[in-house]
């Protein structure tokens, strides 16, 4: 029938589920994970603790945390056979393309014995994913530059281990500074979850059919890839490089305002935040710290700061309440660490994996049914096949 459904393209006003994981107040710029403000978590906690919190609902005590960190360490290696999947890709394949493939392929390794209705099985899926994502991500990079894959080191922290798998070689040990390790960990924390964003909604929807969780995460990676979502961090860097000089900013601002030009200011705007993105403030502060530590003065940072200033005074952006989002400054930090632009969205995917799997787990822990949106049909009326 007609008019039976709420028409809400883009899901601007439709709640698809109940959730106890993350709260956002877009007008006030508030983001809470299980009740805890994101800026406090970024400052005082660390990524693995936030993973535990998102998954279990409470912060771990010292003993629980130690056990959790230990469990994650035990799952960091990937099956040697996965190497064949990497080798099947062209060397210049985009790392997000490789990630869609290899994470999807994990489903083949963990399928027959997996019972998604068993809470312990679901938990182990989460551990495996949290633990293996940095290994898989670093392997993408190593493959692209033709260096041997580095094994994870289970005596190192989560962020440090990732940086070492990226930058160590069998002949040289990469010693990372504590400031960079902390910054990396903070980037993971700031991206850990964001309630029903496009990729998380994708994971929940894919999961609603009872599909293999590793395959569901691959679906999330696909949804994250686009420049309107997680691909924005890569797009910001490309944009800043394209702007090239402060004197060119007005031209790009003009283009962003032109409804006939598809160009948009990357790293600006948000569906839910209409005041500021609390993550972007922490990110900017971290960016300043990292550049100071490394003694870098990146001209792109100057362009970014100036762009922000100009946009925040422009009536177009003010009226539409467009502010820098989480991805506006993250790329400058990652670039300063030596991480290539094509890996930025992979790092978002790694960080968001805990959010995805926590939502998948929440879905399966509560009464649920398959997700099945309806439509308003606007196509041809019934007609007869010619002849
Ligand atoms: C993430 O949802 C999440 O929570 C996502 C995320 C997470 O943690 O999971 O926070 C991560 O995806 C961050 C967003 C990254 N994307 C970008 O930075 C890309 C640039 N931003 C936009 O494309 C856009 O702002 C979105 C996708 C973020 C939001 O899209 P909406 O909510 O559909 O906003 P809209 O298109 O309805 O915008 C309203 C108006 C429009 O103008 P009018 O038609 O009313 O005249 O603002 C304009 C838009 O054209 N606008 C922009 C703009 N963003 C919106 N104009 C210029 N530059 C921009 N960036």
Image (cartoon, helix red, strand yellow):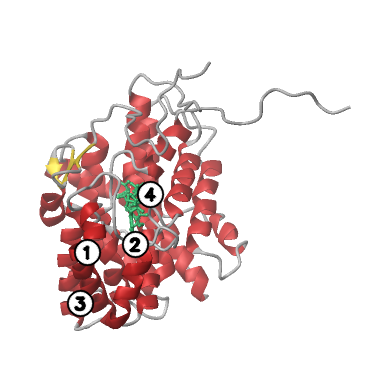
Q: Earlier in the sequence, mark 1 or mark 2?
A: 2
Q: Earlier in the sequence, mark 2 or mark 3?
A: 2
Above or below for 210 versus 356: above
Q: What's the distance in space between the residues labelled 1 and 2, CA to CA?
A: 10 Å
Label 4 C-beta lies within 8 Å of the nearest ligand 1 atom: no
Residue bearing the label numbered 4: 75
Q: Residue 297, image x and y in percent?
A: 22, 83
Q: What's the distance in space between the residues labelled 2 and 3, CA to CA?
A: 31 Å
Packing grade of label 1 (10 A; few <14, some 14-19, many >=20) is few
The residue that appears at 46% across and 64% down in the rendered structure is 139
Element type where label 1 sits in the image: loop
Contact, mark 2 vs mark 3 (Cβ under 8 Å): no
Q: Earlier in the sequence, mark 4 or mark 1?
A: 4
Element type where label 4 sits in the image: loop
**Residue 47 is at least partly visible in this image:** yes
Name the mark nearer the viewer: 2 or 3: 2
Q: What's the distance in space between the residues labelled 4 and 2, CA to CA?
A: 48 Å
Q: What's the distance in space between the residues labelled 1 and 3, CA to CA?
A: 28 Å
Residue 205 sits in quarter: top left
Left or right, 208 with reference to 91: left
How many marks do you count on the picture? 4
Residue 343 sits in quarter: bottom left
Q: Nearer the viewer, residue 208 or 327?
A: 327
Contact, mark 1 vs mark 2 (Cβ under 8 Å): yes
Q: Residue 322, image x and y in percent?
A: 25, 55
Packing grade of label 3 (10 A; few <14, some 14-19, many >=20) is some
Packing grade of label 4 (10 A; few <14, some 14-19, many >=20) is some
Q: Earlier in the sequence, mark 1 or mark 3?
A: 3
Which quadrant of the figure contains the C terminus?
A: top right
The residue that appears at 36% across and 42% down in the rendered structure is 356
Picture disc at residue 257: 2
């Amino acid at each position: 029938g007609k008019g039976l459904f709420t028409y809400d393209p883009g899901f601007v006003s439709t709640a698809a589920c109940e959730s106890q994981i993350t709260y956002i107040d877009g007008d006030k710029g508030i983001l809470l994970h299980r009740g805890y403000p994101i800026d406090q978590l970024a400052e005082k906690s660390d990524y693995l603790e936030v993973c535990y919190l998102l998954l279990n609902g409470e912060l771990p005590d010292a003993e629980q945390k130690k056990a959790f960190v230990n469990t994650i360490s035990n799952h960091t290696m990937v099956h040697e056979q996965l190497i064949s999947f990497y080798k099947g890709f062209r060397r210049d394949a985009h790392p997000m393309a490789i990630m869609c493939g290899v994470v999807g392929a994990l489903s083949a390794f963990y399928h027959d014995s997996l019972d998604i209705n068993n809470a312990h099985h679901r938990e182990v899926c989460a551990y495996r994913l949290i633990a293996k994502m940095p290994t898989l991500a670093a392997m993408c990079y190593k493959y692209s530059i033709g260096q041997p894959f580095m094994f994870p080191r289970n005596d190192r922290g989560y962020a440090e281990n990732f940086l070492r798998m990226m930058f160590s070689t069998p002949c040289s040990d990469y010693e990372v500074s504590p400031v960079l390790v902390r910054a990396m960990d903070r980037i993971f924390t700031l991206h850990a979850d964001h309630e029903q964003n496009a990729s998380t909604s994708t994971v929940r929807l894919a999961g609603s059919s009872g599909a293999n969780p590793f395959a569901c995460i691959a679906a999330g990676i696909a949804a994250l890839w686009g420049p309107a979502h997680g691909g924005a961090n890569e797009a910001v860097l490309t944009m800043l490089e394209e702007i090239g000089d402060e004197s060119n900013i007005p031209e790009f601002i003009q283009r962003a305002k032109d409804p006939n030009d598809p160009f948009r200011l990357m790293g600006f705007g948000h569906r839910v935040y209409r005041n500021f993105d609390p993550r972007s403030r922490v990110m900017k502060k971290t960016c300043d710290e990292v550049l100071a530590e490394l003694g870098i003065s990146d001209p792109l940072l100057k362009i970014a700061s100036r762009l922000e200033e100009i946009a925040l005074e422009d009536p177009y952006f003010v009226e539409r309440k467009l502010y820098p989002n989480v991805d506006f400054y993250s790329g400058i930090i990652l670039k300063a660490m030596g991480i290539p632009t094509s890996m930025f969205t992979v790092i978002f995917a790694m960080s968001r994996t805990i959010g995805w799997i926590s939502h998948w787990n929440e879905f399966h822990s509560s009464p649920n049914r398959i997700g099945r949106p309806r439509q308003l049909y606007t196509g041809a009326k019934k007609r007869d096949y010619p002849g």
